[in-house]
Amino acid sequence: MRLDPRVSQAVVLSLLWALTGFTLLILIVIIVNISVEGLPRVSLSFLTQPPHDMGRSGGIFSTLVATAFITALAIAVATPLGVGTAVYLTEYTRESWLTRLIRFGAECLAGVPSIILGLFGFVLFVLKLGFGWSVLSGGLTLAIMVLPIIIRTSEEAIKAVPEEYRVVCCSLGLSRWQTIARIVLPSALPGITTGVMLSVGRSLGETAVLLFTAGAALRTPVSLFDSGRTMAVHFYILAREGISLPNAYATAAVLMFSILGLNLAAYTLMQRLMRRFS
Amino acid sequence: MSPKGIERLLLALALSSVGSLALITFFIFWEGLPLILTTGPGDFLFSTHWAPTKDRFGIGAMIVSSVVVTLGALVLGVPLGLACAIVLAEFAPLRLKQLLKPTLELLAGIPSVVYGFLGVLWLVPLIREHLGGPGLSLLAAALILGIMILPTIISISIDSLGAVPDLYRDGSLALGATRWQTVTRVVLPAARSGIITAIILGMGRAVGETMAVIMVAGNALSLPASLLDPVRTLTSNIALELGYASGRHREALFATGVVLFVIIMILNLTAAAVTRRR
Amino acid sequence: MNQSPPDKIRVEELSFWYGGLKALDRVSLSIRAHEIFGLMGPAKSGKSTLLKVLNRLCDLIPEARIEGRAWLDDLEILAPETDVVALRRRVGLVLSKPTPLPRSIYENLVLAPRLAGRPKEELPAVAEEALRAAGLWGEVKDRLHDSALRLSGGQQQRLCLARTLAMQPEVILLDEPTSGLDPISTAKIEETLFQLKSRYTIILVSNNTKQIARATDRTAFLLMGRLIEVGETSQVFTVPRDQRTDDYISGRFG
């Protein structure tokens, strides 16, 4: 017997909507649970006190410092590399085997799992170069992880700069580099910022890379060669070793809302940009 | 700096991603390949006997576990992800789509340690009480990964559904097909390569995920006999033991990395090939 | 060889291809100093391409191919060793669409002079002089640091003209500068051109034959990349030598 197509459509559609609703529900449950269990414990003193007794009591100050330190280093290294790559790809070459190779490299790099990056950072930075478990090793490895994100967003942002600007600058006697430095990059800055924000978000949540490159020392790192435990690593250790469920939840809340906030801000910025250029 | 100098500098920056990829490949293979060769590739890949203290390195069980966990993740993630993508791309009102798409993409911003944490708190006891076994299991890992790959599948699928020209839909609707028939017979086939890419990249994400899997999979070394058995994947094997391994044991972990890296690269290359053929 | 060409710009047997597409076909002409020279012709006749060759903006076009020669005074425009930045400072271009850069009015004006090495303290005077010459000073003098994107279309185009003047070029190329403007803005621009004539050599491309007739001293008519006719504007418009010119200016053209 054949069903009336309209009846079967109604059945299938309600199923699809139910599945979509279920997916949303998962998201909502995660966010609500972390908020309800974690946020009440987040206070100024939680953020400004160092952890005591392996994190059983006290706050997360040292992990905030380590996170900021490592993330800042990663961004400081990856941004010039990524923006430079994007400028080269969009402004200095035509499509060729070389540009295809560079794009392919970035694409593959984006697919490399973090545990492999962790292995790589461990053998190159920690062992071979002798940086040890340190902010430096962690930051450099994270830089490689976020490089593809910065390349992709910068390339899109630079491509969105109207072609007439380049023609005008050229006819005003600006060299190609002057055009890029004075007009193209400033116009693409919001888009590049979006990429940086997404990269910070990605770095905040990363654990596998940092366990084997930055280590897990709870002391506040003060130099590039100190080991540092980031928020995500701290949370992992609190949860996995059953040290303190309430503190794990509170750390998760700080972590998750920083990342979601950054992603939301990046998304809003991107939307505003797209409206401006269309 | 001269224009030629600037161009050379930018080219050097642009080679950073390819260079990093080459370095990663080199170091992982350099550290891991000798052990595979001395153990014998057959023994290393197919033996299920992993006993570093007895100099026995067989990752057969981990390969099987990684594969099964990944397939399990696809069983949950693909239908759920495609349902969301179809609803959002084809049936949801524009406003709702503009709200839901970024919301679902927020799932990607939740760090993997948070997924693992909530998996341990909710999913593991649920499985232990209702289905039996230790709870920390292949099933738990597959379910968590199934959720974690949703953002990848949803956003790439939505983009490829969105790329199908409206003309196709109008043509089909004009012939009296319902919207659902139009989706299954016209839109999905037209978006096929994009959806396949989404699934392959989702697979890559699942195979490479580490932290969440460590927390919920139980990490037992034996070959799983049922979905409720604890398992250890390739990624967890590296992450669990790298902290204290040395000598041949460490080499064996890099060798595990080689296998993982090769699997990921095959998936990435397949995804790239599918996209290019479009 | 030492004898300098009497004309400001001289083009000899110039051909231009976009990939396989021929845009200019052995065009030769001379443009005198301090005249307004009109270039007219239907779409795709090669007018804009000719302008792009004169300040080497054609370098930006991938797959372009050029044959023939062109001179600005003694400078061979198309020679590989020519300093294109110096050339572009001598030959300014105003595009058909008003394209202010996303900066303040003032920044738009002083960008080129600053990079050309004009001392910082001279820049305000350069900006004012250029705005006065373009007839825009009165309208914007109180908001020089507002975004240039907030000006009206006509004001934007006069800003683009002023921006080119601030560079103190010798030749100004205008590529259909009034095509998107209302009649009043158009009249203001044409008036400005008359006043600039004494100091600059001006080449005006337009597909508006009335504008060419009103505003230029001599005129060339291009059709499908070929130069059909060139002469005093009054002569071209009253007694054209070629039937196709006659057809074009009387609007009988396909």
Image (cartoon, rainbow, N blue to C red):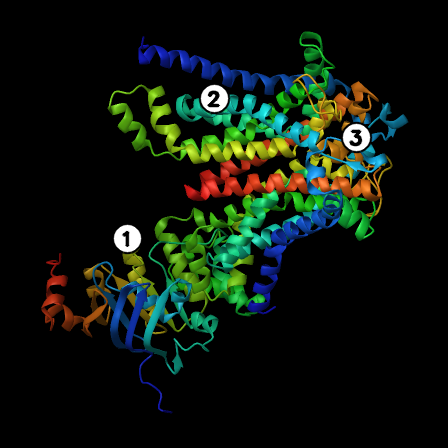
Q: How many labels were placed on the picture?
A: 3
Q: Chain of mark 1?
A: C
Left or right: residue A151 compared with residue C225: right
Which residue corresponds to mark 2?
A: B83
Q: CA distance from mark 1 to mark 3?
A: 69 Å
Please identify the quarter of the rendering in which residue A197 is found: top right
Which residue occupies the foreground of this view, B251 or A81? Answer: B251
Instruction: Note whether C59 is above or below B143 in the view shown.
Output: below
Q: Chain of mark 2?
A: B
Q: Give the residue displayed 45% in from the left and 35% down from the top.
A: B194
Q: Are marks 1 and 3 on the same chain?
A: no
Residue A201: percent from the left, percent from the top? Answer: 65, 36
Q: Give the residue displayed 49% in from the left and 40% down from the top.
A: A273
Callout 2, which amino acid?
Ala
Q: Give the residue displayed 72% in from the left and 50% down from the top.
A: B30
Residue B148: mark in rendering: none
Residue B68: percent from the left, percent from the top? Answer: 62, 26
Please identify the quarter of the rendering in which residue C159 is found: bottom left
| Front label number (2 vs 1) | 2
From where the camera sits, is residue B228 visible?
yes
Please identify the quarter of the rendering in which residue A109 is found: top right
Which residue corresponds to mark 3?
A: A234
Which residue occupies the foreground of this view, A213 or C25? Answer: A213
Which residue corresponds to mark 1?
A: C184
Secondary structure of the residue carrying tag 1 is: helix
Quadrant (top left, top right, bottom left, bottom right) of the C terminus of chain B: top left
